[in-house]
Amino acid sequence: MMSVNKLSVKKYGTLFSGAGLALTGAFLLISVAVISAFPRLRIDLTQDDLYTLADGTRNIVSGLEKPVEILFFYSEEATADVPQLRTYGTRVQELLREMEIASDGMLTLRVIDPVPFSEDEDLAGEYGVQPVPLTQGGESVFFGVVVLDPATIPAEDESGAPAPQSAAEAAIAPKVFETIPLIRPDQEEFLEYEFSKLITQVANPELPIVGFLSGLPIDGGVNQQTMQPTEPWMFMDSVRQLYQVQRVDPEADSIDEAIDILLLVHPQELSEQMLYAIDQHVLRGGKAMVFLDPNAYSTAIRGPDGIPTIENGASDLQPLLAAWGVEYDSTKVLTDAEQALLVNVGDATRPIAHYGMLGIQRTSMANDIVNTGLQVMNFSTPGALAPIEGAGSVFEPLVQSSSRSMLMDGALFNALGDPSILVDDFVSADRPHTLAARITGRVQTAFPNGRPVVAEAAVDAPADGAAAPADGAAPAPVPEPAVAEQSAAHLTESSGPVNLLIVADTDFLSDRMWVQIQSFLGQRIPQPFASNGDFMMNALDNLAGNAELVTIRSRGRFARPFLTVLDLQREADDRLREEERVLMDSLQETEMQIAALNANREGNEILPEQQAEIDRFYEQQLETRRRLREVQLELNQDIERLGAVLKFINTALVPILLIVVALLLGYARGRKRETAAALVGAGLARD
């Protein structure tokens, strides 16, 4: 009986093992089939969804109406010994691959490794991708992206060379491509946006049209004092290089629908017809960038005493701002004690802090694409923006003041000769104020009753040739005001999410705030000292893109800092600073005592008391330095202990846990086999 049971157990055990292998093989085959059939299936388990495309990106690539090709020039072999750059290159390639998968075949990716003296190297140079040396005198690498329209690339003949084209053909069909010559690691958060923008520009290569309406001579004018023509503001030269520029007549009653971006600078006393036209432009999906100012220095007139006077320097855009959910007071100027610029006034021996002229640092700028690469932006007597509570729009601050800021009466700045008087009236509000903001979401019209009524002027005298009314006759009736014909296209709310950028300063654009201009051979050469112009071009670039680009936010950071280590370092730094403060206090006290002793000593003789104090000072200094070294040593020991714990977890604890789990599974599997064998044995025994 026992032999029979053993044979039966062995038989059934063999069957179970074979079935397990068969099931495992079937599972692997099914997994391979599923992965092959559904290449888009991804599971992103990272905290910030680092490998998940934004909805805006998916909409852009899936909505392409013609094929677009991406060339990723990446020196894979040259980066073999640079693990950080190699890992970064892998992430960039994975992002591009995800975009290719989401495009339904309209987007193709080609990864090119341009080895030296190859055709691929020539191709990279043709598209503007240049090699960058990793180290001085070391090997150079290619790391750039080109997005192109393959339909505009000349076909190749049988030898692989471009087929010959006539000059007329080349002029009619120029190559359409956009290039990022170098994909910088510090801009990784914005890569998805940058790639999506390039795809949009290639798919729609026509230059966007910027329509500008301004109460300031930003495009050149005449100096009212010297009656000499003035040059356009420097930023307008940059705008004309990248966009088509079209003036908007402030007396018009409509805005050309071909205008992609409406640029409003210092709007003053606009007619209701123009306000309605701006309102409808925004509601039908047009982009707009608005510069307001409670005290525009560009309108100042310098008096006989040399002090500039501003009589009508405030601009506003009500009731449109209220409809967009923005609060703005054109009578208040924002001042900031922490970020005030230093200015030279009169015969002062040193610069004075001007609380109304601000130098906003990078730390006060939001992590938005329009602030990419900016360092400092200068403002002059700006206003402040705020969201209206309960508004349907989304108010996103882009640039803010420090918390040591205050709104002052704008009249103080109309003829401000000495900015030091602002210090006496300054009382901090203990909160930051917004100087620039992005408005998104859906908004309502500021004209719910349609186009405003236009009244015809009353006729004071009969027209030439018309008969005058006879004496005693009733005068001709004055015609009733005519009601403007309501257009069927009147919009009461936006057709989709709007995209508006509002800045509460116009001096921000003037040359004096951000650039010095030199003339060379008749050309104006700009030398920027602030990032105002970069912000302007980033903003227009952002507004000119597909509306879906607005929904693409910066990706999370791939680098994960050791927060515990940073906390230890900060704690040690605080202790070090405390020790330093004690040392400085001790130094000052000892120096005062030595000075007092020196005042009482006779001639050059050093008294015993003085020598004792000097010796005590040196002993204190040595003791304090010893304490500083101890604190630093403790910090290093804490970090080393933490590193040892992490090393143990990674090298020993995880493998131990895996072994324990494997043993438990093996034990459980053995128990199941014993139970199955016992059941089989019991069944045979009954038989």
Image (tube, rainbow, N blue to C red):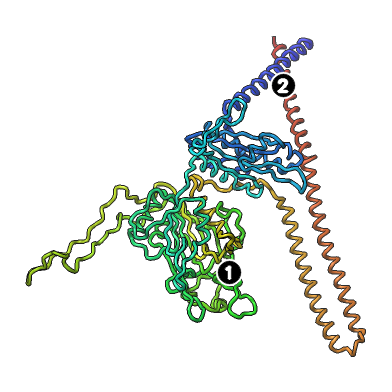
Q: How many marks?
A: 2
Q: Which mark is residue 317?
A: none
User: Closer to the camera, 173 or 182?
Assistant: 173
Residue 432 position, x and y percent, is: 55, 64
Q: From the viewer's perspective, is residue 602 above or below residue 338? A: below
Q: From the viewer's perspective, is residue 530 above or below residue 101? A: below
Residue receiving disc 1: 404
Three-letter amino acid code of the residue under disc 1: Arg
Residue receiving disc 2: 675
Residue 340 position, x and y percent, is: 59, 70
- 224 left or right of 14? left
User: Closer to the camera, 5 or 93?
Assistant: 93
Secondary structure beneath dot 2 equals helix
For the residues bearing labels 1 and 2, Cβ distance under 8 angstroms: no
Residue 263 position, x and y percent, is: 45, 56
Residue 79 position, x and y percent, is: 73, 40
User: Closer to the camera, 186 or 245?
Assistant: 245
- Rendered residue at 78%/72% (across/down): 582
Residue 193 appearing in the image: yes
Three-letter amino acid code of the residue under disc 2: Thr
Q: Nearer the viewer, mark 1 or mark 2?
A: 1
Q: From the viewer's perspective, is residue 486 above or below residue 330? A: above
Mark 2 crowd level (few <14, some 14–19, many ≥20, 10 Å Cα)? few
Residue 55 appearing in the image: no
- Rendered residue at 69%/9% (across/down): 687
In the rendered image, which quarter contains the N terminus? Answer: top right
Secondary structure beneath dot 1 equals loop
Whichever of labels 1 and 2 marks the residue nearer the N terminus, that label is 1
- Rendered residue at 57%/39% (across/down): 147
